[in-house]
Amino acid sequence: MATKINVRSPFYLNLTEPVKPLPLFTCGIADIENLSINQQGQINTPVLRYGIIDSITSSDAGFSNGKFSTVSTATARNITVRVLIPQEFSNTSDVYIDCDKVVTQPALIISQPTPSDPPVSCSGGPTTSGSIPSQTLDVDGDSDTIDLSSYFSQGSEAIAGYSIYNPSTVVNASVSGNTLTLSSNSIGGSTSVHVSAYDNASNSCTATQSISVTVNAPNQTYACTNNGIAAISGGSIAQDGTIVKPNSTGRITAIKDTSGGSTITSYSANNTGSSRSVTLFFDITAPGGYGNAAATIECSLSYDQPAGNPEFTCSNAGLFNQQISANGSIKKGSASEGTISDWTPKSFDPVSSETSRTITFTIDVPSGYSNSGTISCSKTVTQPGEIGSCGNNNFKMSAGVSSPSDFCLQTYTTSVSIKSTGTITGLGGVVCRNDSPFNGRSLYYAISTKTVNIGPNLGRFYIWQIDSNGVILDVLESNCRGTGGDTVSL
């Protein structure tokens, strides 16, 4: 806000309006939800409150070609979700952050020969019918469609739908009815897209097909940077020298500590007392589709290797999603690291207007840190004044974005259940989630009466801007005409 100051001569003022510092983008702000694995080992693409998913990987031995192998007992899986950092954050130059999640994969047991065997985890359901053939596209928007009904057969009930897991930026994948559409981006390469069929029968098994996709870029030479996308990114070196391979659009065949040197599997432990910079060199096999497919190129990355275990602090804990409802009940939220085991107070009295409240959380220190036991972390949360009912109008909401036009850059899914006091065009209504006002952080959300995909070429849809107390500040309607979309205020 500009301020006018009248000053008599001969005094002169040269003032610069202060600029609000940009916040740090964290996994807590990304707020990854609905990340799951089905019985076939297929990952369900999660929903983000903020940011865009770049890749989903795992260091587990059972992870290959973008999915996990099936298991006979429920198994905890370590998953890393790489999130691209939006422009309006102070660490946007880092390009991405890696967010680690532990997800339990359910067992796939479809028979029980003797009573002593484990119980059946699922039965019946769709089955695969043959194999979906490999697909080949050209770069820059080439597309192909596949009739999934030719490759899946129903069980006792009709197939209710299909879920897709696409771990690569090489190709886009979407499904409408029984039709799977694959379309290329601007880079060549090879990947596998996974499709699972499901029905609505109780305790029903799913069926999964993997599709090998190659995007040809015969006039492009695979290099360490391809159309602005790095051939390798991420990875790390632990204090003990353990190397976590980076993500790659090709296939990493060797790791070296010098250019052209011998292959290594780990690096020396850092016992120097301070962190150090280490540069590693990677041999990468160029993926199919490039003019130099199958050739080996060498690319390097520099890493900061820590010295010993750090102390676990409230900054590491990264508390997020803490809320207080109008009636004073507390939603404990989550911690980016560690586990919230207690908090005080347990609730507050209702207030007539917004009131700042301080809550102290007890965090269990995870392994890998120099301290152990618990630490206490305080956080100030705003309690909204008492408002009316959350309403009985049910809607589905997408992840939040900073600008309405962002919905016309990629496909989003309305999968989060909410309620509102108003209709879908109800400006000023109150949005609730889990019977409490939803903290929308003044972001924009795509809204529908059911779970649907919205975005370019997917028809008209509504957008709500929701503030921190769940109030709908703006209602818009979009049809994403043209490159930037066409958003019209109602």
Image: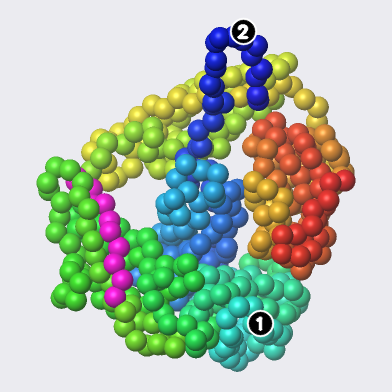
Location of residue 297 in the rendering, given as x and y in whole percent from the top left corner: 31, 79
Location of residue 313 in the rendering, given as x and y in whole percent from the top left corner: 34, 33
Location of residue 82 in the rendering, given as x and y in whole percent from the top left corner: 46, 58
- The label on residue 143 is 1
Residue at 50%, 80% (x, y): give it.
188
Foreground of the two, 75 or 326:
326
Q: Quadrant of residue 164?
A: bottom right
Q: What stretch is highlighted in magenta?
A: 298-308
Callout 1: SS:
strand
Foreground of the two, 401 or 373:
401
Location of residue 285 in the rendering, given as x and y in whole percent from the top left corner: 35, 82
Query: Is residue 300 in the magenta section?
Result: yes
Q: Mark 2 points at which residue?
A: 8
Q: Would residue 105 be seen by someone viewing this image from the given angle?
A: no
Residue at 58%, 85% (x, y): give it.
138
Give the residue type that dot 2 points to: Arg
- The label on residue 326 is none
Name of the residue lying farthest toward the left: 272
Q: Is residue 197 above or below residue 73?
A: below
